[in-house]
Image: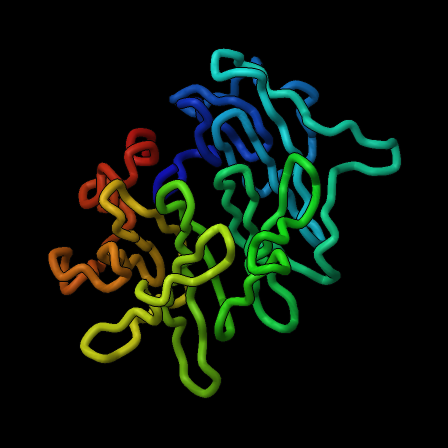
């Protein structure tokens, strides 16, 4: 992680940079030929998530398509595919409906959460990537419907269980993508004391055209990058942090991100 991507890296696993093809990279950006994923898929993956000894690669496609890898211990370098597939099936799938688009994903406490878009709006689905099934402990249905017409989402870990959903929404007849944050627990319940529509001086904070990236820092503050190079920091309650910039908001050029938030974007800034 971090708020910006350097070169063609998609993220880090155990300190190593990876491309979206699951190829390991050097710090200078050269692709290395010593893959740590056995039986690595050749398909193009949109993102991947890692937690402890579990590694999940999430792909493009109608519905949630992913591949789960695991390793026997942290000292073991190689991840191996968890599921063997019949010849007619290219990747594991969990049936969640038809005509679904996948937004951001998050692997937390062994559960894969995914923002899924359909004609009715956007919902957060929870699946067990080891057992390839819906996690019905999440809201009783395995899904939580997000409020409003959602245009972009980011799912952010906030401690061992709850996670933050940062998103932008639009209102009919009113221009602008409005920043909205909420916090969900593993059972799908929402923390009513946290977040909501983010407002400054009584007006919605707009991030046109939506979110670029977001994270929760070590002090529980949500940091959002979006719109026309707008950086927003929220306090642990999900409200604008008045100690940051202009009442919680800084307008910046992308090149200044590492100057302003070196700790929050350490990995990305190190390779920018």
Residue at the location (41% across, 51% down)?
A: 163
Residue 113 in view (yes/no): yes
Image quarter where the C terminus lies is top left
Which residue occupies the foreground of this view, 130 or 34? Answer: 130
In the image, 245: left or right of 210?
left
User: Which image quadrant for residue 117?
Assistant: bottom right
Q: For residue 14, which quarter of the picture?
A: top left
Residue 151 drawn above or below residue 116: below
Whether residue 35 is visible, yes or no, is no
Where is 191 relative to 56, above or below?
Answer: below
| Number of numbered discs overlaid on the protein picture | 0
**Residue lying at the far left of the rendered structure:** 243
Say how the picture is coloured: rainbow
Q: Residue 101 appears at what percent x and percent y?
A: 64, 58
Residue furthest right in the image: 88
- Quarter of the picture containing the N terminus is top left
Residue 26 pos. (x, y %)? 43, 19
Point out residue 43 in the picture as x, y percentages from the top left corner: 69, 35
Residue 31, placed above or below residue 136: above
- Give the residue drawn at x 43%, y 62%: 190
Q: Nearer the viewer, residue 32 or 65?
A: 65
Q: Residue furthest bottom?
A: 173
Q: Viewed as shown, does residue 244 lie left or right of 31?
A: left
* Front in this rendered view, residue 226 or 184: 184
| Residue at 63%, 73% in the rendered image | 120
Side of 4 where 90 appears, left or right: right
Q: Quadrant of residue 87?
A: top right
Tell me what residue is drawn at x 59 percent, y 55 percent.
Answer: 125
- From the viewer's perspective, is 159 left or right of 59? left
């Amino acid at each position: 992680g971090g708020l910006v991507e350097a070169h063609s890296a998609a993220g880090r696993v155990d300190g190593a940079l990876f491309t979206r093809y699951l190829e390991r990279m050097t710090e200078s950006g050269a692709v290395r030929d010593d893959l740590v994923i056995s039986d690595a898929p050749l398909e193009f993956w949109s993102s991947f998530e890692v937690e402890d000894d579990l590694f999940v690669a999430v792909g493009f496609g109608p519905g949630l398509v992913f591949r789960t890898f695991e390793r026997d211990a942290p000292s073991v370098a190689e991840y191996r595919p968890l599921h063997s597939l019949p010849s007619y099936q290219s990747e594991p799938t969990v049936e969640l409906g038809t005509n679904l688009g996948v937004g951001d994903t998050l692997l937390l406490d062994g559960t894969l959460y995914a923002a899924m878009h359909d004609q009715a709006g956007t919902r957060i689905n929870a699946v067990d990537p080891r057992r390839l099934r819906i996690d019905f402990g999440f809201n009783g249905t395995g899904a939580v419907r997000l409020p409003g017409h959602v245009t972009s989402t980011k799912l952010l870990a906030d401690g061992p269980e709850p996670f933050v959903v940062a998103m932008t929404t639009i209102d009919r007849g009113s221009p602008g993508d409005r920043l909205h944050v909420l916090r969900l627990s593993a059972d799908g319940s929402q923390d009513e004391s946290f977040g909501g529509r983010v407002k400054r001086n009584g007006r919605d904070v707009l991030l046109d055209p939506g979110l670029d990236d977001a994270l929760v820092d070590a002090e529980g503050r949500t940091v959002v990058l979006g719109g026309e190079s707008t950086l927003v920091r929220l306090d642990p309650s999900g409200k604008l942090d008045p100690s940051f910039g202009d009442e919680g908001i800084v307008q910046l050029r992308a090149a200044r991100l590492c100057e302003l938030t070196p700790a929050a974007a350490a990995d990305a800034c190190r390779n920018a």
